[in-house]
Image (cartoon, grey):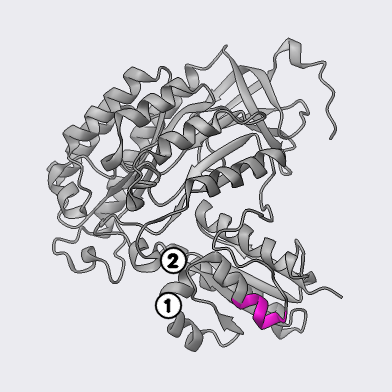
Amino acid sequence: MPVKIYLENLGCAKNQVDAEWILARLVHGGAQVVTRPERADVILVNTCSFIEAAREESVETILELAELKKRGQAKKLFVTGCLAQRYKEELREALPEADAVVDTVEPLDTAGVVARELGLNAPGTARWYAERWRLNPTHFAYLKLAEGCDNQCTFCAIPLIKGRFRSRPLQEVLSEARTLVAEGTRELLLIAQDTTYYGRDVGHPDWLVRLLDELAELEGLQWIRVLYTYPRYLSDELVEAMARNPKVCRYIDLPVQHASDAVLRRMGRGTPARTLRFWIERLRGRIPDLAIRSTVLVGFPGETEADFRELVDFLEWAQFERLGVFGFSPEEGTRAWNLPGRVPEEVIQERVNEVTRLHEENALAWSQAQLGKRLRVLVDGRDQESGLWVARTEWDAPEIDHVVWLEEAVEPGSFVEVEVEEALPYELFGTLAPAEKSMPVST
């Protein structure tokens, strides 16, 4: 009988790709993946430790799944991922329920450790392995360009966990992309800790541009979405590549974090506010109807009311179509851990709430501007709770951005035209355009 493995994946899309590589290699070694933990012989928890809330979720998940082992339903419990990489010894002491805390950074090394623990003969010695056991619908896939990070943001622990930036070879990334598209992927989402740094660590600053141009030639691929673009390494060449390739979504994820130069310096961002404004204007001028997603961090040590007002003024100017808002959370081991000038928690929350309200007004205005329009959307599937079908425009990444709700049944993975009839800040409601209503759909 094959070993039955259940994997609980936590954290970001980069973690998900790691999990998919790990599972694929274990399956090649003879394991069987199951979708319910109570059916598993072995449970893997692929953890996140980016912020305190993520660490708490990881520990709670481990303890919850450990109950299955205590009841004899599972024989082994392994902890992998960022939490294991950062707090290996502490976890071993605090969580005796875990049979192994695997602290390897490279996902294929992790798979090798788990395989040996289970007596599996997992094949493959290449550092990067194209096959993946998909954890999301196959019509979209995350394409991971690199591991680690060379940026020195004072609030971020990622370099402490993942090490220096390490680009995957361009041809290996393209080979994986071809495999994914051949398997039915219609949308590729490019990810790394910093996608705009891709190739720079190995002397090839043009790799991201070349990647976009070559991906655009893949038959069957419809959308290419670029995430995690660090403003410091934007270039005119990248903007032009996005503009000239119609398959590249009119969407970019551009985390600015703040707009006060004083705060940006303390954050170690390396990009002053005037440069942020320059690139936002350049992007919007070159790519009509572009949606910019960004993130901001409020309450950073030393952030004054004047600093915060600079940020608010900037956001009112930038009019980001998508925005994530976070309050500062001190991370042990980072340079911001001991910075003076801590902002009181109640002030941080007030600032988070103010920026959130501001963005909600922007989001509602954007949604209302879509009323009566006909939009092309990608259908992700059916929401079990509401019974409605969930779709996305090219201006929306999975799980983090807006959604389009449909009552009519549509094949997941299909691109269809919808007419927008109702708008909320983060949701659109529509019906299939007349030409689409006769399309056959299997439910």
Q: Does the magenta segment cover residue 248?
A: no
Closer to the camera in the image, 329 or 170: 170
Residue 343 on image: x %, y %: 20, 57
| Quarter occupied by residue 158 | bottom left
Q: Amino acid at mark 2?
A: Ser
Q: Is residue 214 left or right of residue 119?
A: left
Measuring from the top left, give residue 49's x and y in whole percent.
Answer: 44, 66
Q: Nearer the viewer, residue 97 or 102?
A: 102
User: For residue 116: magenta?
Assistant: yes
Q: Which residue is mark 1?
A: 87
Depicted 238 relative to depicted 343: above or below: above
Main SS of residues in magenta = helix
In the image, residue 74 above or below residue 255: below
The image quadrant that residue 295 belongs to is top left
Q: Residue at x 54, y 63 (%)?
A: 127
- Quadrant, the N terminus: bottom right
Q: Is residue 186 above or below residue 172?
A: above
Question: Is the Cβ of the residue at disc 2 closer than 8 Å to that at disc 1?
Answer: yes
First reached walking from the N terminus: tag 2 or tag 1: 2
Q: Amino acid at mark 1?
A: Tyr
- Name the quarter where the C terminus is drawn: top right
| Dot 2: element | loop
Q: Position of residue 388 (x, y in %)?
A: 72, 34
Q: How many marks do you count on the picture?
A: 2
- Residue 136 sits above or below residue 128 on the image: above
**Going 45% across and 26% down the picture, which residue do you hit?**
364
Query: What's drawn in magenta, residue-wise?
Result: 113-119
Dot 2, crowdedness within 10 Å: few (<14), some or many (≥20)? many
Residue indicated by mark 2: 49
Q: Is residue 30 left or right of residue 208?
A: right
